[in-house]
Amino acid sequence: MADRLDIGCGPAKPQGFDGLDRFEYPGVDYVHDLDSGGPWPIEDNRYTFVRAIHVIEHVRDLRQFFSEIHRIARHDAVVLIETPHFSARNSWADPTHVHHLSVSFCEPFLRGYLGPQFPRFKLVRSEIKFGGFLLTWPGRLLCLLLGQESYEKHFTWMFPASSIIVELQVIKEAEG
C-alpha cells in the first residue's frame, strides 16, 4: 500500500497511489460513497499526501469530507484539491455538482466562523487557473495585478476562470 491517496480516482488511478472511489473500478483500493455519512474504510494517520481532483464539488457534507481527510492523514500531510471555479461553464454544466466554489472556499473553516467545527488545516497555497491562453489573458492579468479576491469580486463573469487549486497541510495536536 502507498502512503498517497487519490480520492475519486475512477478507473485511472495514478501509479504510486491508493485509490478511493464510490464505484468498484479495476485498481480501486477502497470502495466508498463519500456521501454515505459513515467513516471511510481507511485506518487513522495512514497518508502523507491526499489529493481530490474534481471531487469536492460532488460532496454534500464538506465538514464530514474534511474530517475524514484529517483522520486518515498524518500530521503535516499535504492535501491537494482541484475543483471547477464557480465562473467556469463546466461548474454549472454537470448536474451532479452540489457546490460552485470560489478560491477562498476554505476560509470559513480555516480562520472563520466555522473553524471550531472543522479539524485543523493550514492553507499552503490557493490558485485560480485559466484555460487556454488566447481568450483568458485579460482574466489572468487582472488576477495577477489585482489579486485573486478582487478578480473574483469584479471581473470573474467577464473573464471566467477554469479551476481552483488549493493546497492544505494537516495540523494535528501533539499526542501527550
Image (spheres, rainbow, N blue to C red):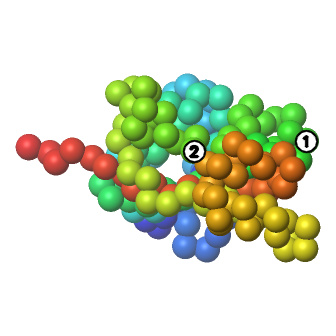
Q: Residues within 10 Å of mark 1 (few under 14, many from 20)?
A: few
| 20 versus 127 height, above or below | above
> Which residue is the site of mark 2?
104
Residue at the spot x=74%, y=31% of the render? 98
Q: Is residue 108 above or below residue 14?
A: above
Dot 1 or dot 2: first in sequence order is 1
Mark 2: few/some/many CA within 10 Å (<14, 14-19, 20+) = some
Residue at the (53%, 37%) spot, across then down? 65
- Residue 109: give x, y in percent of width and height: 45, 35
Q: Is residue 124 left or right of residue 74?
A: right
Q: Is residue 22 visible?
A: no
Q: Quadrant of the C terminus?
A: top left
Q: Which mark is residue 93?
A: 1
Report whether 111 appears left or right of 126: left
The answer to whether 54 appears left or right of 121 in the picture is: right
Q: How many marks?
A: 2
Q: Identify the disc placed on residue 56.
A: none
**Position of residue 4 measured from the top left corner of the image (x, y, whole percent):** 48, 64
* Residue at 87% over, 34% down: 95
Whether residue 146 is visible to the viewer of this picture, yes or no, is: yes
CB within 8 Å, label 1 to label 2: no
Give the residue type at disc 1: Ala
Q: Position of residue 33 (x, y in %)?
A: 64, 36
Q: Amino acid at mark 2?
A: Ser
Tell me what residue is drawn at x 44 percent, y 59 percent: 124
Q: Nearer the viewer, mark 1 or mark 2?
A: 2
Residue placed most toward the observer, 47 or 100: 100
> For the residues marked 1 and 2, what is the alpha-carbon distance in whole angstroms?
22 Å
> Circle 2 — which element?
loop
| Secondary structure beneath label 1 | helix
Percent position of residue 16, x then y? 55, 73
